[in-house]
Image (cartoon, rainbow, N blue to C red):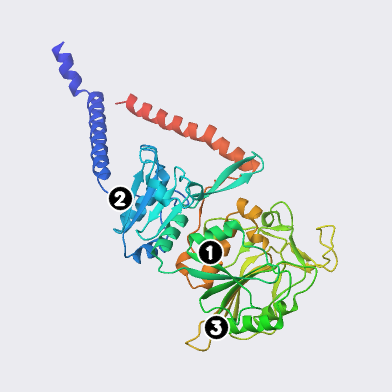
């Protein structure tokens, strides 16, 4: 019996089995040790496709300019903090020693948030407060995620994360010495600035004022830019002179123009002097990937420009309904540079008959593709005078509240445009991060091939490998 036991230890099968068991134990021990060591290293890698938990360069540049202590408070019940929000806020605190993160339980500390409530109402759970001592900004929980209405489910769905966009905007707001002034032109039945745009302007420390060039001697000196939103009447010759005088001295303006029954010759002449012209037609796009179910609801392509590059890289969608085409004039100053921002597909046309009853292309309609939003720079020859910058869009519906509720990237597009006008490029690239999943589209043949590989080929390979191992061990 003893001889049998001793002999079993010298058996090849026992030795091979012992080696295998020893190697397994060693590998497991190494994995445990590596896991314990790595767990102690404060190093993380964001492997999410859209880098949800990583900050943009613009946020880091903003934090580099902070010179005073800032505390970001999160209003959450103890143990119920939003882990996504916490992880992103930690990125700020880890980078800058001027930023501290604290979570306050609004149930246990009901009076804490009262001093941050401007209208006396309590702040909602999940809100953030960015406090710099002498100045603060409240970010509502619903502003941390952009949502849209899903017509198929009848419910709101989350489209993109706006946590970094909101927090960095709040940091800029609380650290700014003064507000930037944006003047909205008045006196021509312009549209009121929509609430979504007005709110975002406030988030980025803009002060919105009205400008009437009939009663004002000139555009005020503190104007960062002028906003012209869907005027229904033309400017007078006197107003035109004041606008031209402002723009010629390095002024900045954004025009969102709608197609009207009557022409606006003074506005058109102003645009002509900067190398562009609004054509009296309504753009249609027959490419299904470039419209939102209706040819008049354009989903234009993004141009190669700082204004739209973050929207493009984050795969966000901008909708331009009922827009006019913008074309370059044949003769313009050499100092003028015109860059497309939004462009239709080659399968687009523009209806010249404004009383059309069909969106189909007809004889006489203009051939696409078209530019529907452009950025214009008139480079100054005087080193003491800034370049003139103009944004021209062929429709004001880009900021219509019914559109921006479903497509919040429209507001990002306009805010990026305004920041470009102000030369504030550090505020441009912070775009919401898309939550829309990418779907794998496969043809029927691809599905059959994949199924054959998974169901037949791979099992046969595994079976063959197992058979080979069994045959080898059988002869040990």
Name the mark on residue 447: none
Q: CA distance from mark 1 to mark 3?
A: 22 Å
Q: Nearer the viewer, residue 220 or 395?
A: 220
Q: Is residue 227 above or below residue 463?
A: below
The percent position of residue 128, horizontal first and vertical second, equals 42, 49
Q: Which residue is mark 2?
A: 43
Q: In the picture, which quadrant includes the C terminus?
A: top left
**Location of residue 119 in the rendering, given as x and y in whole percent from the top left corner:** 49, 51
Does residue 102 appear to the left or right of 421 in the view shown? left
Residue named by callout 1: 309
Q: Residue at x 41, y 66 (%)?
A: 176
Spatial CA span between label 1 and label 2? 30 Å
Q: Quadrant of the N terminus?
A: top left
Secondary structure, mark 1, is: helix
Residue at 36% from the left image edge and 61% from the top image edge: 134
Mark 3, residue position: 379
- What x and y, as percent, mark residue 219? 58, 79
Furthest-bottom residue in view? Answer: 382
Tell me whether the residue at label 2 lies in contact with that at label 3, contact meaning CB atoms closer than 8 angstroms. no
Q: Earlier in the sequence, mark 1 or mark 3?
A: 1
Asked if one can make out residue 260 in the rendered structure from this viewpoint, the answer is yes
Measure the alpha-carbon separation of dots 2 and 3: 46 Å
**Which badge, 1 or 2, is on the more N-terminal residue?**
2
How many marks can you see? Answer: 3
Tell which residue pokes out farthest to the left in this image.
2
Residues tagged 1 and 3 counted as in contact (Cβ below 8 A): no
Residue 4 vertical placement versus 373 (above, below): above
Measured from the top left, where is residue 228 in percent x and y? Answer: 64, 70
**Does residue 46 show up?**
no
Packing grade of label 3 (10 A; few <14, some 14-19, many >=20) is: some
């Amino acid at each position: 019996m003893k001889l049998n036991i001793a002999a079993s230890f010298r058996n090849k099968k026992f030795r091979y089995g012992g080696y295998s068991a020893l190697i397994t134990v060693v590998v497991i021990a190494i994995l445990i040790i590596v896991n314990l060591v790595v767990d102690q290293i404060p190093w993380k890698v964001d492997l999410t496709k859209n880098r949800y938990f990583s900050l943009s360069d613009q946020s880091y540049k903003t934090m580099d300019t902070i010179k005073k202590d800032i505390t970001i408070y999160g209003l959450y019940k103890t143990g119920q903090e939003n882990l996504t929000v916490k992880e992103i806020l930690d990125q700020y605190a880890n980078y800058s020693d001027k930023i501290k993160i604290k979570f306050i339980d609004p149930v246990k500390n009901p009076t804490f948030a009262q001093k941050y409530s401007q209208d006396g109402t309590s702040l909602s759970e999940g809100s953030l407060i960015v406090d710099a001592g002498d100045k603060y900004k409240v970010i509502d929980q619903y502003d941390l995620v952009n949502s849209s209405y899903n017509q198929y489910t009848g419910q709101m769905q989350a489209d993109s994360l706006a946590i970094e966009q909101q927090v960095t905007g709040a940091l800029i707001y609380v650290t700014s010495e003064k507000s930037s002034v944006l003047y909205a032109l008045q006196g021509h039945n312009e549209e009121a600035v929509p609430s979504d745009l007005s709110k975002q302007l406030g988030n980025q420390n803009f002060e919105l004022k009205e400008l009437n060039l009939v009663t004002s001697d000139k555009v005020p000196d503190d104007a960062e830019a002028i906003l012209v939103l869907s005027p229904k009447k033309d400017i007078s010759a006197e107003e035109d002179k004041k606008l031209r005088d402002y723009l010629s001295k390095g002024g900045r303006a954004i025009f969102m123009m709608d197609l009207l029954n009557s022409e606006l010759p003074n506005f058109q002449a102003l645009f002509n002097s900067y190398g562009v012209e609004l054509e009296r037609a309504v753009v249609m796009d027959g490419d299904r990937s470039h419209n939102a179910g209706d040819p008049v609801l354009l989903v234009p392509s993004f141009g190669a420009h700082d204004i739209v590059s973050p929207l493009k890289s984050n795969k966000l969608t901008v909708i331009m309904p009922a827009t006019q085409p913008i074309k370059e004039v044949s003769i313009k100053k050499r100092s003028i540079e015109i860059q497309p921002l939004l462009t239709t597909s080659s399968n687009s046309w523009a209806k010249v008959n404004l009383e059309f009853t069909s969106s189909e292309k007809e004889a006489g309609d203009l051939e696409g593709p078209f530019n529907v939003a452009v950025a214009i720079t008139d480079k100054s020859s005087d080193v003491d005078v800034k370049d003139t910058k103009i944004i021209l869009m062929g429709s004001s519906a880009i900021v219509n509240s019914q559109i921006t509720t479903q497509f919040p990237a429209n507001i990002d597009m306009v805010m990026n445009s305004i920041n470009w006008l102000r030369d504030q490029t550090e505020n441009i690239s912070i775009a919401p991060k898309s939550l829309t999943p990418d779907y794998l589209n496969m043809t029927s043949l691809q599905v059959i091939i994949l199924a054959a590989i998974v169901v037949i080929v791979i099992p046969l390979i595994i079976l063959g490998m197992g058979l080979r191992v069994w045959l080898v061990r059988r002869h040990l």
